[in-house]
Amino acid sequence: MTDDTPQRAAAGRSQAERFSSAYCVLQEAIERRAFPGCAFGLLARGQVLLNDALGHFTYDEGSRKVTPETVFDIASLTKVVSTTAAAMLLHQRGRLNLDTRLGDLLPGFVVGRASSRNARRITLRNLLAHNSGLPGYAELFRTDPSPAALFRACLQLPLEAEPGQRAEYSDIGFILLGKALEVLTHEHLAPWVRREVFDPLKLSSTRFCPAPQDRIAIPPTEIDEIFRHRRIQGEVEDEHAWLLHGAAGHAGVFSNVPDLLRFSAEIIAASGHKNGSASAASETSVHGLFNPETVALFAQRQPPEGSSRALGWDTPSANSSSGRHFSARSIGHLGFSGCSLWIDLDQQLAVVLLTNRTWPDRRDQQIRDVRPAFHDALLEALAHSETQDR
C-alpha cells in the first residue's frame, strides 16, 4: 500500500485555488459559528471536481477534523435519498400507483375521523407533493413517546386544508408515506432501501442507524436538553425518527459527500442527457437504476400554483437555497441539520453541502444565507474556469 497523502494534499490545494470564493464563504461561516465544520462536493458532467472539507466536529479545542468522507446526519435528505427513491423505483416497477389513496393502504387514517371526506381523497401523490392538507409539523414526541402512540397520532392528526389546495411541507406526510411504502413492499423501509437503492449504487457509507462503534466518527448534532437529555452523536437528531427506531420516511439516514454525489450521478444519468455518461460511469459507478421517464415525472412541479414542490423533490424558487445559477430543471432538498443536495438536470451537475449547523443547539439560522452564497460562488467559479479552459 502506498501513502497517497501528498497527492491528496496537492489535489486539495488545487480545488481550494479553483473554487477559492466558495471556500471563503464556508470558512467565514465557520468563523461566525454558523456551523463548526462541513464537507462539500461538486459533480459536473460526469466528473467529481470537488470533494473536500473544512472545520471540526465541534467548537471545542482539539475537536476531530471533518474530512471529505465524514458521515453526517442528513436529516430530511432522507426524504429524497430513501423514501422518494423507493417511491420512484416502486412506480417504475409498476408496484406503486401515485393515485392510490392513503386510506386504502393505512385504513387507520380514515377510520374513526369525525369527518373523513377529505382524508379519503388523499393519495400518495399528495404526500409526495406536500399538498395533502396535513400540518407541516407537530411535536407529537412530547405527548406520544412510543412508536405505536406516535404512529397512531400521525394517523389521527386533523387536516388543515383540502387535498391539493395548499402546499405545506410536512414531516407527518412523509412519516405516513414511509409506512405506506412498507405496506406495498411487505418489508420495513430501511432494509428495503438498503437492498434496492444503497447497495446497487455502492453507497457504502449510507445507512439508517449507524452502529454504536461508528458513532464517534460522526459529528454531533446537538445537546438535547428537552427530550433525550444527552449529547446526540451518531443517532438521528429528529425526535420522531428516533422514536420510530431511527428509521422513518422523513429522517434517519446518515451519509457522506462521495455517496451523495454517486446518488446524484444516477439521477443525472437517467435525466435524458447522454453526454459525458461514460466518464460518469467511470467516476461515480452509474448503474441505470432509474429510467428517464421516472426522473422526469418525479421532477415535475405539482399543484397548487406557486408551489416549488415536485414529487418528493423541491425545485428552485425565488430566493432559493440553490442560489441564482441552477436552472429551472433542477431538483434538490434541504436537511434540518444543515445539509443540502441540489441537482441540475440541464447542466448535469450536483452540489452537496453537509454541516451540523444545529450544534450545540438549533437556534442559529445563518445556514439560510450560507447556502445560496456557497452555491453562487461555486457555480460562478466553475463557469469562470470552464471559460478559461476553452
Image (spheres, grey):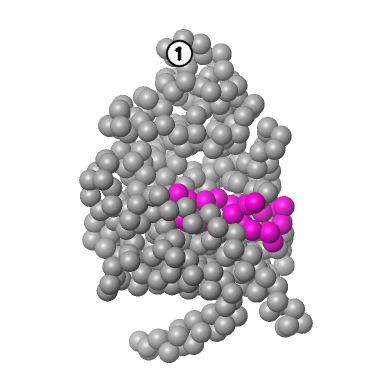
Residue furthest out toward the right: 390
Position above or below: 160 against 175: above
Tell whether position 259 is magenta: no
| Residue occupying the point 51% across, 84% down | 13
Task: Classify residue 211 as left or right of residue 88.
Answer: left
Foreground of the two, 57 or 279: 57
Q: Residue at left 49%, top 81%? A: 12
Q: Quadrant of the C terminus?
A: bottom right
Tell me if 92 is positioned left or right of 151 in this view: right
User: 194 or 120, which is in the foreground?
Assistant: 120
* Residue at the far top in the pictured view: 114
Q: Quadrant of the N terminus?
A: bottom left
Q: Is residue 108 left or right of residue 276?
A: left
Three-letter amino acid code at the position of disc 1: Arg
Residue 190, image x and y in percent? 39, 45
Determine the main secondary structure of the stretch shown in magenta. loop
**Number of residues whose C-alpha sits closer than 10 Å to that of mark 1, classed few (under 14), some (14–19) or many (20 or more):** some
- Camera-side residue of 216 and 180: 216
When asked about the image quadrant of residue 323, the answer is bottom right
- 185 lies above or below 260: above
| Residue in the picture at 47% in, 52% down | 365
Question: 344 or 186: nearer the eye?
Answer: 344
- SS for callout 1: loop
- Residue 154 in view: yes
- The residue singled out by tag 1 in the image is 113
Q: Residues in magenta?
A: 319-340
Q: Is residue 191 visible?
A: no
> Compared to 273, does 168 lie above or below?
above
Tell whether position 336 is magenta.
yes
